[in-house]
Image (tube, helix red, strand yellow):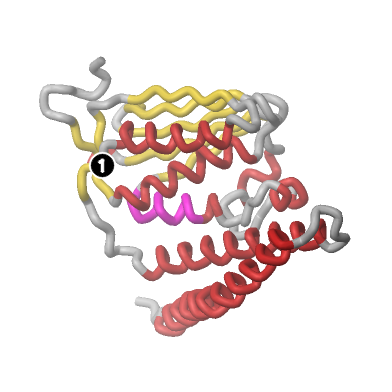
Amino acid sequence: ARDITRLYHLNRAQQDFTLNVSHELRTPLTVLHGYLETLFDTADEQAPYRTPVLRMMDQTRRMQAVIQDLSMLSTLEAAEGALQHEPVAVLDCLEDIVEDARELARATGHVLNLNGDPGLLLLGDESLLRSAFSNLVFNAIRHTPIRTRVDISWGLDGDHAVLWVQDNGAGIPARHLPRLTERFYRVDSGRSSDRGGSGLGLAIVRQILDMHDAQLQISCTEGLGCRFGCRFPARMTVCVPGHPPGAD
């Protein structure tokens, strides 16, 4: 036996601190961003402060995104074990995500392809799974060069159900892979900041998958692209009656 009381209280204190800080920062940032928008909208196009105000607006949006992700991560950690287990139509969920992602891809020229098994459902929390899957899909667009191909697939791999998100971008050096799911870890901090990354997306994905007893698998080849997989155990899968997995 091992007494983990102190560790438990430290973890709770960390979660409470993060949630409180996120809550306290959200309101003043919203007010600040609102005033900046007013200044920008009312400024003459030749006003010398127009560009600095625009840059400040971008930074407040970025800070709001970081706070939102921090709050979500802390909420997930606090709610671990209180997971809903309902059948989720993963392919339908992915179709919605890809439709939204294609709006972002219009400006970047990314090509998205989705293939999935409609007869394979998953037991879990639909809102959390949607968040994890959308993180992976949108990351593939944000962190790869323009006109990159992104393939999303959902189906069985042996006894496991697996979601794959694969791109053919520049890839990630092998030395970074063990740390990709750490909070605020970035392979290229400058590029991630420019594209709105908070450094928390993969940490959120890992936490959600942990809650579903699933694994996050990452494989990358520098110069050839990356492949992110969400592998779920067989006991988390559900087959649609009359439509076995793998059927057309």
Q: Is residue 29 left or right of residue 50?
A: left
| Extreme residue toward the top, this view | 248
Report the magenta residues as a range: 204-213
Reading the image, the residue beneath label 1 is 88
The tally of labels here is 1
**Dominant secondary structure (helix, strand or loop) of the stretch shown in magenta:** helix
Quick check: 217 above or below 31?
Answer: above
Q: Position of residue 205 (x, y in %)?
A: 47, 50
Q: Label 1: how many residues lie within 10 Å, few (<14), some (14-19) or many (20+)?
A: many
Residue 205: in magenta span: yes
Q: Amino acid at mark 1?
A: Val
Residue 45: in magenta span: no
Residue depicted at 42% across the width and 79% down the height: 8
Q: Position of residue 98 (x, y in %)?
A: 45, 33
Q: Position of residue 163 (x, y in %)?
A: 41, 34
Quick check: 92 above or below 236?
Answer: above
Q: Position of residue 214 (x, y in %)?
A: 37, 46
Q: Is residue 14 visible?
A: no
Nearest the viewer among 67 and 229 is 67
Q: Quadrant of the C terminus?
A: top left
| Extreme residue toward the left, this view | 242
**The image quarter in which residue 130 lies:** top left
Q: Which secondary structure, mark 1?
A: strand
**The image quarter in which residue 183 lies:** bottom right
Q: Is residue 100 left or right of residue 123?
A: right
Q: Is residue 133 visible?
A: yes
Q: Is residue 65 left or right of residue 6?
A: right
